[in-house]
């Protein structure tokens, strides 16, 4: 527990007050649901790009990446390294496609290309995965702050929830984006500060620390053997390809940023800024974890007995940082949570209004849409706090596994749907529905035959249990929807597909313009 200096406390208080102030400042501009969810269309590309970056770099990055590198190496970073490679090939078509064919919800594309069921399935998938993620982020950051300051975890859960709700409820997407810009810089500053101290404080300086990190294989991406049954470099490469497609092609938090840009060119530029900014910061926090290992295993400093890898970075912050720097890092940890959760809340509300409320009340006015959106932000915030409080009550155990298992069963294969719609004119809704059904059955089998309760598998099929690493589950689910959906489509009449919903329509449009 820290004995915080008044300067550190002041930095944290100013950070919180500034966030609240932004919500009130932008509140007066939220006169319509379009402004609330998509902004004024005047936000510059660089700001939207930094907002994408800040959304991707959550408190999980700030806290979990150093722990992962400390415990193992940089293998988890491989997933992030695949993102720019995939985007270079697809962002030029994904951005104009969404800006042309959808109003607000990413999953409107799935309805226009296939069916209402495809849209509802994808929307529910987004909701489930983001609720589980939001509760995790809020709990982890509250736990870290509690460890550092001695205040109860519950205090931080409720306090952070209130701040994020006020910002998102009042300020809408415009406030979210501009606060993400500020919080993004704060997060970068906190990470650079910690890395700088780790590099320059020990005798020998940066050269010694980096040399030792390489020697100890803490800066490494192995194992490199080609196996999908264990966590290897190639598992993360394959997983990273589908992660990039899912995040930038089907995730509402990112697609909604495309819609906030002034034009296609700005939206593409924002996407590239977000990606190119995220990868170095992911690497920075991996580097922090590697340097922490060297710092505490070469005699520079020592750790209390029994400390786990998850606690090392928090201990370093509390014992090695000077006055003022601690406040900056605490503010950065909170900023990382705010910049991720405010985006999730706004986007969940957008999905709720566009995919569900408006379908139930097709004649609703814009004012009613705006009110419904704000109520959904409030509901999302309260629900996130409840999930985080459940984590606290159960010491972070139990509910997390249940949530992710449910998400795996009911929401897998979204990238498969997207690729099927984008690249195949022959695919139809009947074939897709069969693909989704096959995906759900497969995912249920894989989860049940790999999940243990009291050290006993829920479903033990012996040699027929799912044999591969859990990260491959998501990969296979997307492939199943794509392959089964495509070939099942030949059992039904060929559909009339609007060319603008496929890559072929975009290519025709591009050739005419050039």
Image: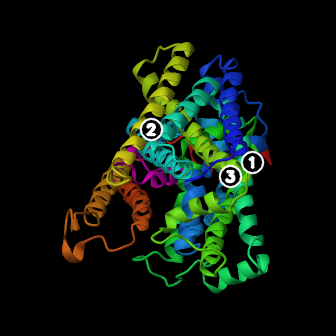
- Magenta stretch: includes residue 31: no
Q: Which quarter of the picture shows residue 45?
A: top right
Q: CA distance from mark 3 to mark 2?
A: 27 Å
Q: Looking at the picture, tell me which residue is in the foreground, 303 or 408.
A: 303
Q: Secondary structure at mark 2?
A: helix
Residue 257 % position (x, y): 65, 40
Determine the residue positioned at 50% across, 44% down: 138
Disc 3 or disc 2, which is closer to the eye? Answer: 3
Q: Secondary structure at mark 3?
A: helix
According to the picture, the residue beneath numbered tag 3 turns out to be 326
Q: Looking at the picture, tell me which residue is in the foreground, 509 or 88.
A: 88
Mark 2 residue crowding within 10 angstroms, few (<14) / some (14–19) / many (20+): many
According to the picture, the residue beneath numbered tag 1 turns out to be 185
Mark 3 residue crowding within 10 angstroms, few (<14) / some (14–19) / many (20+): many
Determine the residue positioned at 62% across, 42% down: 339
Q: How many discs appear?
A: 3
Q: Which of disc 2 and disc 3 is earlier in sequence?
A: 3
Residue 159 % position (x, y): 53, 34
According to the picture, the residue beneath numbered tag 2 turns out to be 384
Q: CA distance from mark 1 to mark 3?
A: 16 Å
Q: Main secondary structure of the magenta part?
A: helix
Q: Which of disc 3 and disc 1 is earlier in sequence?
A: 1
Disc 1 or disc 3, which is closer to the eye? Answer: 3
Magenta stretch, residue numbers: 409-431
Q: Secondary structure at mark 1?
A: helix
Residue 244 can be seen, yes or no:
no
User: In the rendered view, would you say 383 is above or below 513?
Assistant: above
Residue 486 % position (x, y): 41, 56
């Amino acid at each position: 527990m820290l004995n915080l200096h008044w300067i550190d406390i002041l930095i944290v208080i100013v950070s919180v007050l500034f966030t609240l102030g932004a919500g009130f400042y932008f509140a007066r501009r939220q006169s319509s649901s379009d402004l609330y969810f998509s902004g004024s269309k005047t936000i510059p590309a660089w700001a939207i790009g930094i907002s994408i970056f800040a959304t991707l770099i959550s408190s999980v990055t700030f806290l979990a990446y150093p722990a992962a590198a400390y415990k193992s190496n940089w293998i988890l970073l491989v997933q992030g390294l695949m993102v720019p490679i995939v985007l270079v090939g697809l962002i030029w078509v994904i951005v104009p496609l969404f800006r042309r064919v959808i109003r607000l919800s990413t999953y409107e594309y799935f309805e226009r290309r296939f069916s209402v069921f495809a849209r509802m399935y994808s929307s529910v998938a987004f909701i489930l995965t983001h609720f589980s993620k939001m509760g995790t982020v809020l709990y982890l950051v509250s736990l870290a702050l509690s460890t550092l300051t001695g205040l109860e975890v519950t205090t931080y859960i409720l306090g952070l929830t209130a701040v994020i709700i006020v910002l998102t409820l009042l300020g809408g997407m415009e406030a979210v984006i501009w606060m993400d810009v500020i919080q993004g810089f704060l997060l970068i500053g906190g990470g650079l500060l910690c890395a700088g101290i780790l590099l320059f404080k020990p005798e020998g300086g940066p050269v010694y620390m980096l040399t030792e990190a390489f020697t100890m294989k803490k800066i490494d991406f192995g194992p490199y053997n080609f196996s999908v049954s264990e966590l290897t470099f190639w598992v993360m490469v394959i997983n990273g390809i589908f992660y990039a497609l899912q995040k930038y092609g089907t995730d509402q938090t990112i697609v909604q940023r495309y819609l906030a840009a002034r034009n296609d060119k700005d939206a593409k530029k924002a996407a590239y800024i977000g990606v190119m900014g995220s990868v170095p910061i992911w690497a920075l926090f991996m580097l922090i974890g590697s340097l922490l290992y060297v710092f505490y295993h070469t005699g520079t400093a020592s750790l209390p007995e029994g400390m786990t890898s998850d606690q090392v970075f928090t201990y370093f912050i509390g014992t090695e940082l000077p006055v003022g720097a601690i406040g900056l890092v605490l503010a950065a940890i909170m900023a990382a949570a705010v910049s991720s959760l405010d985006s999730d809340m706004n986007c969940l509300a957008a999905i709720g209004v566009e995919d569900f409320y408006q379908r139930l009340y097709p004649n609703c006015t814009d004012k009613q849409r705006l009110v419904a959106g704000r109520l959904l932000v409030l509901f999302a915030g309260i629900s996130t706090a409840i999930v985080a409080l459940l984590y606290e009550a159960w010491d972070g155990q139990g509910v997390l596994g249940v949530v992710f298992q449910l998400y795996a069963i009911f929401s897998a294969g979204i990238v498969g749907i997207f690729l099927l719609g984008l690249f195949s004119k022959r695919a139809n809704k009947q074939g897709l529905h069969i693909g989704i059904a096959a995906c759900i059955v497969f995912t249920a089998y894989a989860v049940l035959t790999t999940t243990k309760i009291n050290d006993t598998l829920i479903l033990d099929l012996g040699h027929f249990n799912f044999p591969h690493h859990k990260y491959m589950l998501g990969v296979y689910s997307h492939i199943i929807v794509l392959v089964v959906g495509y070939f099942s489509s030949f059992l039904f009449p060929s559909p009339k597909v609007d060319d603008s919903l496929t890559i072929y329509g975009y290519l025709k449009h591009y050739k005419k313009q050039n």
